[in-house]
Image (tube, rainbow, N blue to C red):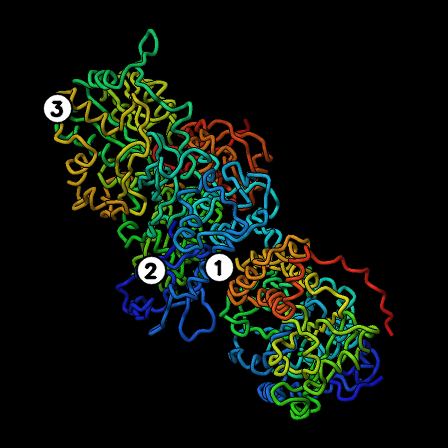
Amino acid sequence: MADYAPVDRAADNMVTFELNGRTVSAPAGTILADAAYAAGVEIPIFCYEPRLGPPIGACRMCLVEIEGMRGMQTACSTPVTQDMVVRTNSPAAKDAQDGVLELLLAQHPLDCPVCDKGGECPLQDRTFKFGPGKSRFIEPKRHFPKPIELSSRIALDRERCISCFRCVRFSQDVAQDGQLTMQERGARSEITTFTGDAYEARFSGNITDICPVGALTSIPYRFVARPWDITNTPSVCGSCPVGCNTELTTRDGELKRITGRDTPNFAVEEGWLCDKGRWGYDVAMSPSRLTTPIVREAVGDRSVSIEDGVAAAASLLTGRRVGILLGGTATLEEAGIALDLAANGTLANAVLARLGVASGNCAPLRAVTGAQLGDIDAADLVVIVGGDPAAQQPIVELRVRKARRFGARVISCGARPHALESLGEFTRTAPGRLGDAIAGLGDAIAQASRPVILWDEADLASDPGAIEALSGLLAASPHATQLMLGADVNGAGLSALGVPTTGLYEAIAADEIDALMCVHADPLEAAGSVAWQTALDGFGGSVIAIATYASTMTERADLVLPALAMWEQEGTLVSMTNRAQRLRPGAAGPAQAAAGWEILIAIAHHLGHPPAYRTAASAFGHTVASHPAFRGVTPDLIGTDGAVVGAWPTADTHPAAIVADADHLVLVATRDAFGDDMTARSHALRTAVSAPVLRMHPATAQALWLNDHDRAVLVSDAGNSTALSVRCDTRVAEGVIVGPLGAPGHPIEGALARNQHQALVRVERA
Amino acid sequence: MPILNSVYRHREAGHVLTDLAAYRAAGGFAAIEQSIGEMEPDDLLYVFHRSGLRGRGGAGFPMGRKASFLPKDAKLAKYVVCNADESEPGTFKDREIIEMNPFQLIEGMVLAGYAIGADRGYIYIRGEYEHQARVLDAALIAAREAGFLGDKILRSDFSYDITLYRGAGAYICGEETGLLESLEGKRGQPRLKPPFPAVAGLYSSPTLINNVETLSALPPIVTQGADWYAALGPEKSPGTKIFSISGHVVRPGNYEVVLGETTLRELIYEHAGGLREGRQVKAVWVGGSSVPVLGAAHLDTPLDYESLNAAGTFLGSGGCIVMDDSGCIVRATLRLASFYRHESCGKCTPCREGTNWMERILQRMVDGDGRMEDLELLESLFGRISGKVLCALADGAVAPVASAIKMFREDFVAAVTNGGTPRPAPMPVVEVR
């Protein structure tokens, strides 16, 4: 992993020092190990990991000689100073490296041939590079029953552990889940949880990335491949709007593993992944995966080849008034091609819309200077307005915790409780009254020198008063930056292309559409599903579903075309921080499936309008790059690290304001990354799943004559939810019900209006 | 029997001073009355400095200088921490002071707290000292009731209290940063230094850490003057030192001597009553088990920091362990190596793995599986363990092994060539007079 921190070699506070006889420079205060690495000298390390916080100097691998200092110094804890003279290759330094490696290997089993880490193991690599060729340790090494399941996803081989404390520090300092610790002492030290229970945490998988030996390995990847069998492809995660940069490990065309990148994207995820992004890929092999096109006929379903499926789609679309509905995970290429087909006459006058939160009214907020997640590190004030980032955009949690560790003040306000509130002050607000709490933030923001305001797209969109208050506050605080906590995976990208959330539903209701093509979209499982159900019940035309997984819509569609999953295709997603990033395939996918963009191009060929592009990259150039937000952006520019694109256009509808009143409660929907249907379908994540419940204040529950574990149904103007279990939680504002968005069976979507994540509801006992 | 020139009032008085009135009668709390509110803190600090008092915990760092490293910024919370984790093998001097004279320690901590402007003091006492913790607890209550602790001590502006904290039994918690970690409720492991505790110690605040014996020496330094103390013994390391003698001596126990005025021979043969009849000194670990071992040739070394350094060892904690010629140096060395393997916290690789390896090699030698190259192997390991780590535990683990092999090489060679060491005879019961 990212063992050394990047060094800014163009800083203005550079110092020069001597390294192995060479004169090199680095910013004053840079850690010597990092400065040396940037200058091309590798000082071996094990416990040092800049992302874990201050160095601890435990492994002693990085001992170097510094003139004028007594004994050997650890390069991981020594800042560089002007005219310092450092030797990393002197006889004394070599002897220290030999010595530490010999001692590390004294008890370490030489089972590299059967160890999963073999071939990509820092201990192995550094032993070859820096260590003695032979061990003089003739005693039996320590043995343990092997391995222990630290959790259902992480195996622990204790005899391989070199006690570097990286995993403990990750758990204690970075994720702050407080679970991992070292037990016993000295040569008998071993990693365990405080309680002895499984290490169940949402970021637990990162310890398999940072473990410098084969002690902590991923159970789904155990004994699956050797480093020379695999290829690694940089990609991004499409599970949530954050867009963490990932690396996909492929063997024989199959996706075997997802890790953080060796070179993390410090602007986004800093190399950390949530467990869903890391292990959730097995849904692509789950029974709900669509693998062949299905033609639904009166006599029954018929599986056909992808070529025949595309031909069937073309015939269903020919001469029809077409509607195209894009889901929140649709890529820029898919949206761009759809827009192009509508514009160039292939599907003349097709009506395009997307599923997702309508937040055109948030435009004044987006106009303020946008921050990247990496900017949170340096903030001295982090304000979280609405939302539940820890559940909805998981990796944001680690960034905010890091800022807090560096001393930033954290202020939260909103209707629902969340994990980051405990990091600082928070105000619980009634829905629709977020503006009151925002008004009280002025002083704190004025006092801060680098404030970053995180605001929740869905919450703010339902609260016009809050938008006004926050945009006023941001206008008065030119030093403040904002960061949207987005609702939809590619919501920013689809909005930037000008795809509206409305128009199509209305056209279907008005009987102006003959053929509906859903691309990664299931309106029957989205907010407003009841209204969509009604509209589609009266819809006489044909429905084509281009989808990866079976859903309500693919059960109903006349033609289902299986699309490749996000790990199998090319495409571009725009993260919630307006960062365009590229998906790259790490698996071949089912033989009779194809990428959404490929299917759309093939359909165009069948319709007699062959487009000028054949690949994802040329489709991007022809259809996406011409939009104002993407001017000058090319796939090459996006590269592996992404490119920040322009601000969004404002052409989107404004959702209804939701203000609690005496007759209604307010449903605030939260998409828990670990409570949605994707997690439920993953075998690897089976122990991480959070149950769908309705959370409400005990007083609210009491007024409704409800107790914990009673089942209740939400009723709104939009429709009814299905019954869910009630949980009392004193942290929820009174009059508010926090419900699970995207949960298996999509229980609450029926009570929500289209394109909105809040609703006025009544509650009935089920 | 009263001891002349003793720094410790119970020794001077010749009886136990666990009663506050008795301690006052023996001259106790005069130093507090003389200084708190009467002297400028800096002047008091200067008294400590001039006395030349060196830390009695083992490292021998000048106490006044250590205290002067604390920032003067009054806005920062500051702490005095007393290291009462007396876990060095063969050392039991702090135990005596706490058991018999707890108020002198408390008085010393108040003086130190006043001098540095501390907000609170902590006594970190080893878990095994259960009785001693009770004695201290009672003394703290009595001192608080008498107005020597708590709000506005003796109606001055100085408020200061002491919290007693019991460790759970780990040698590493005697290392000052390991102690601080443990005191903060964490796993006892040394910290990376710098920052040193004087700058960022307990709860990241400036902290003065000293041993029981050191802090207890402060009251007489105040009442009798820095000059009196500085005049005791050699110029560079003045004062008295309590040596705890154990092992093959007739009269094991604590003996306070003026540094530099007594030789090791006098300590063993006059104070401790010599060895059993017909026995000769084989080996002496003068400063606890973590110092290089001395042999019979070193018996005329004067007991002070400099002379012992010149003899190749350290004064350390003053835990003097004597072994006569009935003992086996190889087995004794293995026993010490086992101790350090057991007590290594496991944070630094060289210490964690090195102490384990040294023990395993020595165990083989004792068991008869030793090889001649094991001696060279051990010798090559010493430099890779010692000085390559965060704290002094590894140095302490290497010193007795390295020095034993150097001084008694023939015994180790014999262990290899004879196929092990003879089983020791059962320990005779020594009558303590």
Q: Position of residue A99 (x, y in %)?
A: 48, 59
User: Closer to us: mark 2 or mark 1?
Assistant: 1
Q: Quadrant of residue A41?
A: bottom left
Q: Position of residue A622 (x, y in %)?
A: 15, 36
- Residue at image location 32% in from the left, 24% down from the top: A590
Q: Are marks 2 and 1 in contact (CB under 8 Å)?
A: no
User: Closer to us: mark 1 or mark 3?
Assistant: 1
- Residue at image location 53% in from the left, 59% down from the top: B350
Dot 3: element: loop
Q: Nearer the viewer, residue A685 or B6?
A: B6
In the rendered structure, the answer to whether residue A304 lies left or right of residue B118 reads: left
Q: Earlier in the sequence, mark 3 or mark 2?
A: 2
Residue underneath mark 3:
A609
Does the rendering let one see residue A402? no
Q: Position of residue B415 (x, y in %)?
A: 67, 59
Q: Amino acid at mark 1?
A: Gly
Question: Residue A373, relative to residue A608: is it above or below?
Answer: below
Q: Earlier in the sequence, mark 1 or mark 3?
A: 1
- Give neighbour class at mark 1: few <14, some 14-19, many 20+ (Cα, 10 Å): many
Q: Amino acid at mark 3?
A: His
Residue underneath mark 1:
A99
Q: Which label belongs to residue A41? A: 2
Question: Residue B240, relative to residue A517: is it above or below?
Answer: below
Whole-angstrom CA distance, mark 3 to mark 2, is 57 Å
Report in which chain the residue with disc 2 lies.
A
Q: Residue furthest front?
A: B417
Q: Earlier in the sequence, mark 2 or mark 1?
A: 2
Q: Position of residue A67 (x, y in %)?
A: 40, 73
Report in which chain the residue with disc 1 lies.
A
